[in-house]
Structure formats: C-alpha cells, structure tokens
Image (cartoon, helix red, strand yellow):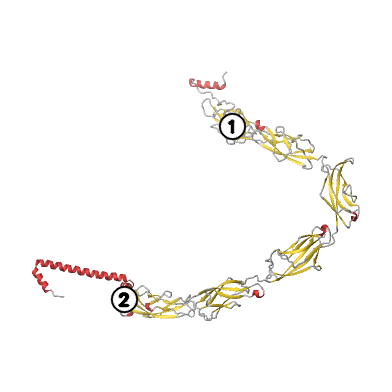
Amino acid sequence: MKSPHSLRLSLLLLLPHIHLARQSDFAPYFYDNGPSSTSGNMALFSIAEDTPVGAQVYTLNGTDPEGDSVRYGLTFEKGSKEYFRVEPKSGRVTLISELDREVEDEIAVLVSITDGRNKVVEKGRVFVTDANDEKPEFLNLPFIVSVPEDTEAGSSIFKVQAVDKDLGSGGSVTYFLQTTPNTKFTIDGHSGVLRIKPGEYLDYETSKTHFVTVVAKDGGGKYNGKHQVMTSSATITINVLDAQDSPPTFVGTPYFGYVYEVSVPGSEIFTVFAKDGDQGNPNPIQYSIFNGSDGSFSINSSSGCITLTTYPIQLKNELYELQVKASEVGPENQLLDYTITMVTIRVVDLNNHPPTFYGENGPQNRFELTMYEHPPEGEILRGLKITVNDSDQGANAKFRLRLVGPGRVLRVVPQTVLNEAQVTIIVENSTAIDYEKYTFLSFKLLAVEIDTPERFSATADIIIHLLDTNDNTPKFSTDFYIARIPENSPGGSNVVSVTATDLDSGLWGDVKYSIYGSGADLFLIHPTSGIIYTQPWATLDAEVKSKYNFYVKAEDTEGKYSLAEVFVTVLDLNDHPPEFDENFLEKTMIIGAPVKVEAVDDDAEEPNNVIEYSIMKADPENVFDINTSTGEIKLKPFIKSMEIVQNITRQKDCKWSVVVQARDGGSPSFTTTAVVKIDITEAIKERIIAYFLGLRNRPLTVFGICLSFVTFAVSLTVFISSILYWTAVRQARVNPEASFRKIIRRPKL
C-alpha cells in the first residue's frame, strides 16, 4: 500500500495529462525527517542543552501539491516556556531561551505549514541532550563525625555521598582528599568511605579536632565544545573523643621552693598541681612524696601543698630535691597511672644587709680625685681606692655596680659582684674629659642587688677635679677679614681688628698676632690687640694699587697657631679732574654728522671717573647740541646745508668755536673746560680732505700714489716725444731740406 505522500506525488504527475477544472485544493505537507535530520517537521529532533541562544538549530521544510508558496509557524502548548522562534518564509528555527536538561529534557512543539488557504499543524517532540554543566552535590551537609581516640588504624569512620545530575560519565562521581601534611585519614574513591590511615592513631591530648577536605569529581564530558571536568568540595569535621590512656601531668614545672631562716614548722613552702592527661573525662589526683624528704617535709595528698616539719636550724643541707608523685584515683579508689616530678627546695639566708662602699678608713660615700684633662683611654684612675661589700650570703650578696653620670666617659669594673670586690674605674672616652668644658666631673657609683625582692642598694659620689693642659689652638672668629680704607689715608690709620681666642687657661690662653705675605709691606699689627694699621710712612693710592691681601697669624706661648686671610680694598677718592687732549680740539664737521670730543679722568672707580659733557658757550649760539655721555657734538636739526651756515655767520668763513665743559661724578666733583674749533664743510669736500689727512697714517699708500704719478709723467713724455719724432721723420722724407732748416732754426734749450 502506497503512503499518502507517494499517492500525492502520483496525482501530481498525472495532473498535466488531465484537463479538468480546478475543483479541489490539496493541503501543504512537511517532508519526512529522520531522528538525526535538521530539516523537516522537528519530529524526534534532539538538541544539546549547551546550544547558545540565537543559534539556528533547525529548518522547517515542506511543500504544497499545487506548487504554491508556503509559510511556516511554530507555537507551544499553553503555559509552556517558549524556546524557539521560526522565520515564516525560510522556515529557519532559532533558539531564543537557554536550555537546561536537568530542568526540562523534552520540549513539545506545534509546527504548522500553510499555503494561504489550507493549514497543517503537527506536534513534535524535541529532546534536550545532556552536557556536562552540573557539579557534584554533597548530601547531608554539614559533615561532622565523632571518633574515640582509641579507634584502630584502618577503621571506617564516615561515608560521604555526592550526586551529579548530569548523565553518562558527567554524572559519575569519584572522591579524593585534598593533600595536607601529616594527614591521618584516607577515603575510598568510589564508595566515599573515610578511614583512618594504616599506621596512624588519633590522640585527644595532641589534637581534639581534625578538618579534612573531601573533593567530589565527575567523570567529565563536553560543554560548549570542550571537555570539562567539574568538582565540588566539602569539609569533614572530625571530633576526637577522649579515652583513659594518658597519665597525669604536672603544670608549671620546674618547681622551686625556699626555706628562710625565720620559717617555723608548718610553714607552707610550695604547692604542686597535676591534672589527668585525659581531659575529656579526668580522674581525681592524689599527691605523695616519693623520695628526698629526710623527714623534714610533708605534702597534702589532696591539695599538693608542701610544708616544713622542722626548724630551719635543724636542716642538714642547703638544697633538697623532693620527688613528688601524682597518681590517678579510679572509680573504686584504686590508684591508677602516676607521674613523678622534682621539687627543688633551697634553704636561704635572710636578706638583711645592703651593699656598702668602703674607703681606706672605713665606710665612705664620697670619693675625690684631681687629674689632668684628656688622660689616655683605658687608663685606671689609681687615685680612687674603693671597696664594696654585702654581708649577706648566696644570692642575697649578689649585686651589680653601675656608674651614673656623663655617658660613656668612665667605666666601672667589675659590673657584677658576689659579697665583696675592689672597684676599678677606667677611662673610656678621653675627649669628653675636657677642662674647657668642665672644671670637674661628678658621677654616682651605684650598687644594686640583683635577685632579691628587697633590691637593697647603696650610692657613693665620685668627684674628679680637672687640671688644664695646652690642648687648644688659637681660633680666629672667621677664616678671612675684609677691610676698606680710603686712599690718601695718613700713615698709622686703623684698617681692621682681628680676633682669635684660645680656650686654654693661664699663659696657654694668651695669643700674639703677626702678619706676613707679599701684600703686608704697607701694614703692621698690634701683637696683643690684633688691630691692623698702615705703616707710618705708607701712602695709599687707588689709582696705583687698590687691592691688598696678606695673612695674619695667632700664636700661643707654645707655638700652636692658626691663620686667617685679610683682604684690604683701597677706596678711591675723587682727586683727579677730567682732562681734554689738546691735540684733538680742532674738528672738521660734515653737515649732518657729529664730531666727538673726549676727556679722561684718572680716578680709579666710578662715579669718580664718569664724565658728563655740556656746552658752556658757543659762537654763534644755539647751533650746537652735545651728547652728555659720549661727548658727540652735532648741529641743530634745522641746519641742513652750507647756505644755512653762511646765512647764520653772514660770511664765507665757517670756522666756529664751542666751549665744552667736562664734569666728573665725584663728590665734590671736578670740572674742566676746553675751546673746540669746528670747521663746517660739505660732505664731498670733507671726504677729500679726510682722504688726504688719512694718508698721513699710510706711508706705503703715499709712496704708491707718488710712484704712479711719476710713472704716468714719464709715460706721457715718452709718448709725446715719440709722436714728435715720427712726425719729423715723415716730414723729412717729404721735404728733407725744409726739415733740415727747421732743425737748424730750433733754438737751443
């Protein structure tokens, strides 16, 4: 029997051969598809749950028997989540919502095809295939287990379980423990059973709680095209339960007790304390003295308090070592495990004597010494004879010596004393023992007990009087001195005062001054006051020499000295007037160009040698201006030609005179005047005159010009003579007789 699809195809093939009116209209239909096909009506279509949203996952495919175009549709049952959307014309199906197989592994869809008149709706099932996207999940969290500490090695103590919602290898789970140092546990990878490792034991007294991290791992699978293994972890808390397996332990060992000379029988000496090593369920403790008492001590069996049973004077030893036993008492008052510890009891002297310092004549608390400053380091202060003593015995007679005063100057030896010692004081810092800083040094010598509760102490004053030595060099107040003195100062004038000090005392502190150096010839110094004067015969002139420098020496009585440099500046006075050069007081001025006059002032410094020029008088008046700084003289701007000059003078003689004054800038200032004769000329004439005047300074040029003139004259004479000669020759050839007559008639020169 043919399928409906085959029947429809047969009818379609017969339609061209049957000429009938179109009375029937067949509905469109989907093409058949297999389980793995991505084209058809989505029947039995499967899709992976990690398919990304927006991906094209299927194509609806069908046709119409009459060949009409078809359109596709895709809907879901009411109340169902919509996962897909179809493009009506092409039939392309797109994923629009994320898939999760663990939530929904099968999706029902209604697909439709229509030719515009007929519509066919078919129901399909889309299967969601698994991807490895789920971690294993532990059940029954948290994991807490209690285990007795005497559980045997290898015993199973707990079982963990984890499930993975994925399918296949992605849903299989294995277990392992995160590796930690010295772990005492192991786990079965398949069953999740936790055991104590072989050879390992639990100990409540060492560790009451263990924390173990167990990891659950799936078998791996693909997710988004890549192989992925997922894990989860959980912590197992293992509480160890105590068991009666540990003996008692003493707390606060080692134990020391003391018997003093004032103790009486029954005095409490020391109390020991022990507790059961099994702290979870402890037994009561009973105390006893096992050995070492010699009948002089007893102990309370319940409290552990040790007491004295005799007088201290009857004790034969200074040290007793008691062996004390602590035993566990069982439920029926039987003695169980026990521990023995040592209690050391010392018979000690009562501390009733403080340390005491002694001099040569008995107890003394003040010691004095006179010495020179800066003794050698390491030297012993032999003038101090000090003894220290403590009359107690043992630890009560042990004390420490300490020197209090200027830091690290002296050192005391010994620093720790038992009973008695000779005290030695040693120089540690020689520089600090300085007479210029201190004329005496004061220290406190302390003796303080070390190990006694009373900490008895004693003090003694040590006074060291210092004697001076010549250990300092004179020092100037500055490394150089700067002095200024006016020129023409009379001989013996005060220049500058220098000062040097010597910190030493007496004659060692006296300073004498002297000067030397190439610049010291004109100066002298007072040997004690340090005042520097000019020599009585000295004359200072800033124009000759304005700077002097030399050295001054400060020296003590033993020849120790220091130097300073002295710089003396001779200040210029305005003692020279300006002077004009008489050879340059006649000037030729080109109209429009200036001429310059110049005066010189022989003073050494400004403003004494700064000159200012001015016109005092001119003939004619009001025709000249002068630059006050440079001395340049020029005509007034309105004089622009020789005609104007001649109109002013009303004569052709254009030689004018100007009285120029030169004033210096000193205080008081000096002035000098000079008459400057100025010949006014045009520019061309001036150039010719200037050229010939300039030849005076160029003899070679003059010689060349003269030689040129001589050469030109000789050449011209030769040229004219040649012309006359050849003219005469031509005439002689034409008329020799006439020529002869001319020659005869030529007068003699």
Lower sequence index among marks 1 and 2: 1
Image location (x, y in percent) of residue 190: 70, 32
Q: Nearer the viewer, residue 353 or 237?
A: 353
Q: Which percent across, then down, holds residue 449?
A: 80, 60
Does residue 521 sit above or below 428 in this rendering?
below
- Residue 575 position, x and y percent, is 47, 80
- For the residue labelled by badge 1, is the local secondary structure a helix, a strand or a loop? strand
In the rendered view, would you say 625 is above or below 10? below
Up-down: is 188 above or below 264? above
Comparing labels 1 and 2, the label whose residue is closer to the camera:
2
- Mark 1 touching mark 2, by CB under 8 A? no
Disc 1 crowd rating (10 Å Cα; few below 14, some 14-19, many 20+) is: many
Q: Secondary structure at mark 2?
A: helix
Q: Quadrant of residue 578?
A: bottom left
| Residue 426: image location, x then y, percent | 72, 64
Q: Give the CA distance from mark 1 to mark 2.
A: 122 Å
Q: Amino acid at mark 1?
A: Leu
How many callouts does the rendering have? 2
Q: Quadrant of the C terminus?
A: bottom left
Mark carried by residue 264: none
Are there few (<14), some (14-19), or many (20+) residues within 10 Å of tag 2? few
587 relative to 739 in the view: left or right: right
Q: Nearer the viewer, residue 236 or 563?
A: 563
Of 595 and 372, nearer the camera is 372
The amino acid beneath tag 2 is: Glu
Left or right relative to 195: residue 619: left
Q: Relative to the observer, which residue lies in front, 191 or 81?
A: 191
Quadrant placement of the N terminus: top right
Residue at the spot of label 1: 74
Circle 2 sits on which residue?
Answer: 643
Q: Is residue 334 left or right of residue 109?
A: right
